[in-house]
Amino acid sequence: MSDIKVIEREELKEKPQGPIGFGQLFTDYMFTMDYNKEEGWHNAVIMPYQNIEISPAAQVLHYGQAVFEGMKAYRQGDDIILFRPDENFKRMNKSNARLNIPEVDGEFLLDALQQLVRLEQDWIPSGQGESLYIRPFVIATEPYLGVHAATEYKFMIILSPVGAYYGDDQLMATRIYVEDEYVRAVRGGVGFAKVAGNYAASLAAQTRASELGYHQVLWLDGVEQRYIEEVGSMNIFFVINGKVVTPELNGSILPGITRKSILQLAEYLGYEVEERRIAIEEILSSEYVSEIFGTGTAAVISPVGSIRYKDQEVVINDGVTGPVTQRLYDEYTAIQEGKKEDPFNWCLKIK
Amino acid sequence: MSDIKVIEREELKEKPQGPIGFGQLFTDYMFTMDYNKEEGWHNAVIMPYQNIEISPAAQVLHYGQAVFEGMKAYRQGDDIILFRPDENFKRMNKSNARLNIPEVDGEFLLDALQQLVRLEQDWIPSGQGESLYIRPFVIATEPYLGVHAATEYKFMIILSPVGAYYGDDQLMATRIYVEDEYVRAVRGGVGFAKVAGNYAASLAAQTRASELGYHQVLWLDGVEQRYIEEVGSMNIFFVINGKVVTPELNGSILPGITRKSILQLAEYLGYEVEERRIAIEEILSSEYVSEIFGTGTAAVISPVGSIRYKDQEVVINDGVTGPVTQRLYDEYTAIQEGKKEDPFNWCLKIK
Ligand SMILES: Cc1ncc(COP(=O)(O)O)c(C=O)c1O
Ligand SMILES: Cc1ncc(COP(=O)(O)O)c(C=O)c1O
């Protein structure tokens, strides 16, 4: 493992006291590297967290050529672990490929990330549901107004200590609004990739759902507006006749790493699991859907208490967390927090 | 009209000699203004063209919350005109609304733009097909990793002198590749808005088409992948039985200002015009499509010489510019260049 150049800062920031929130607080250092045609990815450096300088003609500002990832570091007693970070760099390269962004070297970045997190270990909070959120991202920096795959990029990793997504009540059952007008993604598009534009396109629906008193939007497929895809920034699961069911990956759904892990864990725990197409009517009409929950790095596992589609509102499991959701949550977070053995080798110990 | 504060630069740049190209060269000054919740849009200033400073957590870099516009200033002898700039600011506000970006004041910006272009008038080239390309855009600058409509933005206008889009041969007939796998936009999405993410999503198809020897991609609708939508950064027109026909606006097509103007001009010149759904088979099978051309601010009018769909390649009008295309091009550019009277009041004289 080669050491990455570090530019030190003169003074460290104050660490936060009290509740941390999500994504507004950043640590002392960040990792950056640049790309151009001649040198490829180069100039890797860990430097003080600071504003960057960018041309007003940089392609990312006009054409949204940008991808990102999200993962977490946890404290396990005196140890620090990264949760499945190799999966994130693999997915980043799939996003890169879709947007014609040059591939990054996942192994090199995994080294760089470990060095960065070790340097910043005092920023990893240790409270219930707390962790260090890690945001790697790539932006097109070439100053050129023609629409083309840029020839210059910047890759960065920034770090943000985060609390539980929904504050104290991690397992608060959420209210979900099924979007029947706006569409997030369609096959042939970029829905399967973690690209910037997907999120801008989702804002109007999320804003409307919030105004109506719902926590999240449930997206339907773009072609028929009938098959369930995913929630804001989570994949979605249903407990149907005791079976753990989730929409199959179809090109417009983001292949969540939590989704993949929960499928593995559920099977390991003895549940039958299934990935298939799920029509919205099936969920609304059937008595046999006993639980619904979302999965994602930020919120981990988030139970769904009710779901609204057009004029119909369906309450799930009396609006409280069901037993399968609870069990998966307990087992999953126990692995992340080092309280149970990790049979899948998900946790990469870095200290 | 209130004057906007100007910060002067010490030295002006060299003006270009010889062919100018597109979108790589920027003038001496730019316009910027900022938005926050307390002050709304404020801090309007014309300043030296320069890099901007931005937080690595700025929402535009992660979630693509960004919109832009493209328009042109032309020399007409000693005069300088802007071509339908009010339409661009109107469209920008439609894009803003779709991405939950606060509205901009079109009238104020029109004043600001005039002041900026007057200051930069020596940058407007006067050769055949040359003009000053004007790029207004808005980016979300709030440093926050939660996915939400940002609370801070920057609006900017940058200017770039440009040559004819396809170099010397403005009316070179282009070869078009009909994309049957990738999808650009779908109803319910953001296709009708000029938002950054649409362009990143289009790169893979454009790259493949280029590799296969085609100039541009022709997009089909996202639901059935059957109805013609538009080309890379142009709307598309067909001459069918002498009639000028273009796809109707359906929520996934960008409502081009050139498209709107050409519909008006064609009608004025006595052509029958029609906006309707056009299936790809209709174009491929019929002998009655005599001409095809694209329309857009950058390329103005661009004849299509051949069109490929799956394994079929159809040559249009023997691969050369047809008479209707030529006539519309001549009349349209004559209005822009002040060589003919402007019966529609499209040209806003600013000097
Ligand atoms: C659109 C979308 N779906 C699903 C997920 C869940 O993916 P993961 O479990 O890898 O965090 C995310 C967030 O990361 C997302 O942005
Ligand atoms: C996707 C797309 N379609 C069509 C157009 C043409 O629009 P206008 O005539 O306003 O330039 C543009 C470019 O501006 C565009 O980006």
Image (cartoon, coloured by chain):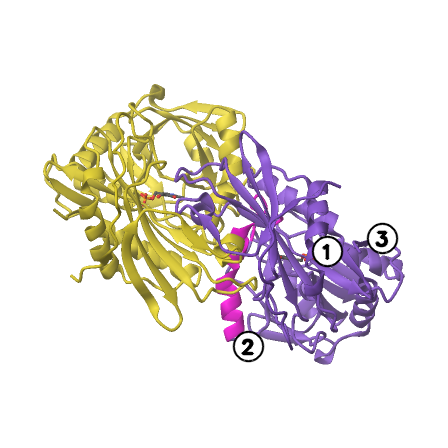
Chain colours: A purple, B yellow
- Residue at 55% across / 40% down in the picture? B182
Residue B90 occupies which quadrant of the picture?
A: bottom left
Q: Residues within 10 Å of mark 1 (few under 14, many from 20)?
A: some
Q: CA distance from mark 1 to mark 3?
A: 20 Å
Q: Foreground: A139 or A259? A: A139
Residue A16 occupies which quadrant of the picture?
A: bottom right
Which residue is label 2 attached to?
A213
Indicate the chain on which mark 3 is placed: A
Above or below for B241 versus A327:
above
In the rendered structure, does residue B57 fall within the stretch colored magenta? no
Q: Residues within 10 Å of mark 2 (few under 14, many from 20)?
A: few
Q: How many marks?
A: 3
Q: Position of residue A33 (x, y in %)?
A: 58, 43
Kindly report which numbered mark, 1 or 3, lies closer to the viewer in this rendering.
1
Q: CA distance from mark 3 to mark 2?
A: 40 Å
Which amino acid is tagged 3? Asn
Which amino acid is tagged 2? Gly
- Residue at 57% across / 59% down in the picture? A10
Q: In the structure shown, which secondary structural element does the residue marked by tag 3 occupy?
A: loop
CB of mark 2 near ligand 1 (< 8 Å): no
Which residues are the magenta region? A185-211
Q: Residues within 10 Å of mark 3 (few under 14, many from 20)?
A: few
